[in-house]
């Protein structure tokens, strides 16, 4: 009886004798495993990046509440019975499991932003939004004074990270302007002209100005515009637009605990509002990436299967070529099980070698792809560190599938070798 | 060790026909005896040798080794029998040409229950016994036909078996080299091994202790022991 140690040693010896074929077969496994690992790592990496983004912009305990809307083809209507006002805020605040409600208000007037960037004058229509300090407290410098009002005459303002990305990848390039970062923008002053815009110029005597200073960027504020402390926007709406009761376009509701999110969402929905939670978005991302993972996994498995068929055929050929060796082994004491074991170990070593090479290949390809993407998309603030997640489960899956496919492919040839009649082989010359 | 064949029959299916290779052979072979099995091609000589060596299960009858039915046991026990008690030598040598003489000789230890710790030394010693002590590291493919057959004999005896079964060992050799190989086999028999040589070369029968003549699957002359016709 040969035993596993001697079988492995002999299998190594045999692979060394038939090096070219062994490399070719291991190469097939390597390509299959590399493709499988690369694709799965890409989906996992993308999922991680998307989830990071979701968790950052809408943490797991946070819910976004908007008035219920109805869609008729491409036209969307807000329900007239679903307005968000201080009364709605109070009713939501008292729901069980709600820790805090942070409304977002929009200026009810047109507005224009004028500034000087890099020595050039810059004028643009803009949205003006009012947000709670707590919404961005962890994303802006603590000493910025956001939320303390405009006592000093200059109002602190936050802009969207996505807006900076859009500027960098579009506007800056087409106008040959320098790239921006939140650090460069910090401290940048601008003037807001309230009550006028390029579409609706306001009478000069009714236009009011305010000086703002950018203090940071956030992925939780509205995209197109500047976000100021909510009290200021509410005051401007009261004084300039005659708004008696503040109307909000969105609330951010914070649940006390992650497990409260579903109950809180159900409670708010029953009040006639539409609710989106980070968990829901994360769930959608997970579902989508699972489907992608299954599809890509299937592609990798097909390639591995083809490699397996190749291994099976090559080993079958090898069995025929080595029939005299098999006959001699039987004549000197090899049992059928020993012969079977030898062929299976050879296939396992090919599979293991191929799978290890495949994992290495996938890691190298992922590194190269990251470098390439980094070169193609250098200006995106939100570019993840890597688009690939070469996690241990994926690596282990690649290794074990490479090994398993090789062993399974070797079962028929190994069985055939074991069933060969040594008497016939050895007397056939 | 004594090997006894009792009414051994072997049928083959070939191209849809049934071939009777052995038709009730009974004979006996003992350690220390050199038996030559002679007969024309297709007479059943090799089939008898393979049946005695535990390589080819008879269709009917029995092969007794020291009174025990060899084929009553399973594949593993038969493999052990071939590994520990029998050494085969074939007309076509059946060596791995890309491996050295020593590597070829050590193959039986690969399947031994307990390979001896001095396996390599035993391999060298077996090669020395067949006068190839200086060719240990030569790839088998580079050796002459006579040297290859000597390596095959060294492989057959490295495990110190009780019987060496040689199937046409001189069939691929010239007369002089063949004579050397026969002398080697005679020497093994004189050292106490049972040696069975299957051949159709009448010259080899000159050195035999006993000659079994076989025709159409039956022993026609020289049988010894139980149930000889």
Image: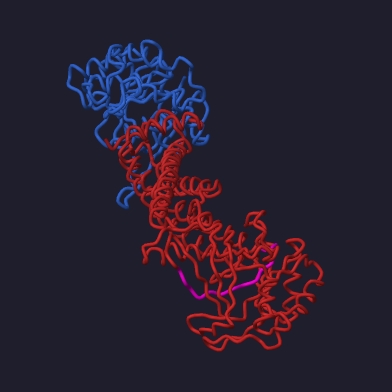
Chain colours: A red, B blue
Q: Is residue A168 left or right of residue B147?
A: right
Residue A164 visible within the image: yes
| A150 or B20: nearer the viewer | A150
Is residue B59 something that shows in the picture? Answer: no
Q: Which residues are magenta?
A: A122-135
- Residue A304: x and y in percent read 42, 53
Among the 4 quarters of the image, the one containing residue A11: top left
Instruction: Name the residue: 76% across, 77% down.
Output: A86
- Which residue sits furthest front? A205
Determine whether A8 is above or below B187 in the image.
below
Q: Is residue A62 magenta?
A: no
What x and y, as percent, mark residue B51?
A: 40, 33
Q: Residue at x 34, y 39 (%)?
A: A424
Q: Residue at the spot x=20%, y=18% of the render?
A: B177
- Give the x, y percent position of residue A261: 73, 66
Q: Quadrant of the C terminus of chain B?
A: top left
Q: Between A69 and A38, which is closer to the camera in this rendering? A: A69
């Amino acid at each position: 009886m040969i035993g596993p140690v001697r079988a492995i040693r002999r299998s190594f010896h045999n692979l060394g004798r038939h090096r070219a074929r062994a490399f070719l077969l291991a190469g097939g496994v390597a390509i299959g495993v590399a493709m499988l690992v690369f694709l799965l790592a890409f989906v996992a990496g993308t999922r991680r990046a998307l989830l990071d983004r979701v968790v950052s912009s809408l943490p797991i305990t946070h819910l976004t509440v908007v008035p219920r809307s109805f869609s008729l083809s491409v036209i969307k209507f807000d329900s007239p019975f679903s307005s968000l006002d201080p009364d709605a805020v109070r009713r939501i605040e008292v729901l069980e499991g709600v820790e805090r409600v942070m409304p977002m208000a929009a200026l009810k007037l047109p507005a224009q932003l004028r500034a000087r960037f890099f020595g050039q004058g810059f004028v643009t229509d803009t949205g003006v939004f009012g947000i709670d300090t707590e919404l961005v407290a962890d994303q802006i410098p603590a000493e910025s004074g956001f939320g303390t009002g405009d006592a000093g005459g200059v109002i602190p303002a936050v802009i969207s990270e996505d807006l900076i990305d859009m500027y960098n990848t579009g506007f800056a390039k087409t106008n040959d302007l320098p790239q921006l970062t939140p650090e460069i923008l910090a401290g940048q002053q601008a003037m807001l002209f309230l009550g006028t815009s390029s579409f609706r110029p306001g009478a000069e005597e009714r236009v009011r100005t305010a000086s703002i200073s950018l203090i940071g960027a956030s992925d939780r504020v509205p995209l197109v515009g500047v976000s100021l402390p909510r009290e200021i926007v509410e005051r401007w709406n009261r004084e300039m637009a005659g708004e008696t009761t503040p109307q909000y376009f969105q609330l951010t509701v914070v649940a006390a605990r992650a497990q409260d999110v579903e109950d809180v969402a159900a409670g708010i929905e029953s009040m006639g509002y539409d609710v989106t939670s980070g968990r829901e978005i994360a769930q959608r991302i997970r579902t989508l990436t699972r489907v992608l993972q299954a599809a890509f996994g299937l592609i990798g498995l097909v390639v591995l299967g083809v490699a397996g068929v190749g291994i099976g055929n090559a080993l079958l050929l090898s069995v025929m070529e080595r029939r005299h060796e098999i006959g001699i082994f039987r004549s000197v004491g090899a049992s059928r099980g020993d012969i079977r074991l030898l062929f299976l170990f050879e296939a396992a070593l090919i599979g293991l070698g191929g799978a290890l090479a495949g994992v290495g290949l996938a890691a190298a390809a992922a590194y190269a792809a990251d470098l390439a993407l980094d070169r193609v998309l250098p200006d995106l603030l939100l570019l993840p560190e890597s688009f690939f997640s070469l996690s241990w489960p994926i690596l282990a899956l690649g290794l074990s599938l490479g090994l398993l496919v090789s062993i399974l492919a070797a079962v028929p040839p190994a069985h055939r070798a074991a069933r060969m009649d040594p008497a016939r082989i050895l007397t056939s010359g | 060790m004594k090997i006894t064949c009792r009414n051994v029959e072997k049928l083959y299916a070939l191209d849809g026909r049934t071939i009777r290779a052995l038709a009730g052979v009974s004979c006996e072979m003992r350690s220390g005896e050199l038996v030559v099995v002679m007969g024309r091609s297709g007479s059943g000589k090799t089939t008898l040798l393979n049946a005695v060596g535990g390589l080819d299960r008879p269709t009917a009858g029995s092969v007794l080794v020291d009174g025990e039915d060899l084929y009553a046991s399973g594949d593993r026990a038969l493999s052990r029998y071939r590994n520990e008690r029998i050494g085969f030598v074939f007309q076509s040598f059946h060596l791995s040409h890309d491996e050295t003489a020593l590597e070829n000789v050590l193959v039986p230890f690969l399947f031994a229950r307990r390979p001896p710790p001095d396996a390599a030394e035993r391999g060298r010693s077996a090669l020395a016994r067949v006068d190839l002590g200086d060719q240990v590291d030569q790839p088998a493919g580079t050796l002459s036909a006579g040297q290859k057959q000597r390596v095959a004999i060294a492989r057959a005896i490295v495990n110190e078996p009780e019987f060496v079964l040689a199937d046409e060992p001189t069939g691929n050799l010239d007369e002089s080299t063949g004579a050397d190989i026969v002398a080697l086999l005679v020497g093994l028999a004189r050292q106490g091994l049972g040696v069975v040589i299957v051949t159709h070369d009448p010259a080899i029968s000159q050195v035999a202790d006993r000659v079994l003549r076989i025709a159409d699957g039956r022993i026609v002359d020289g049988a010894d022991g139980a149930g000889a016709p």
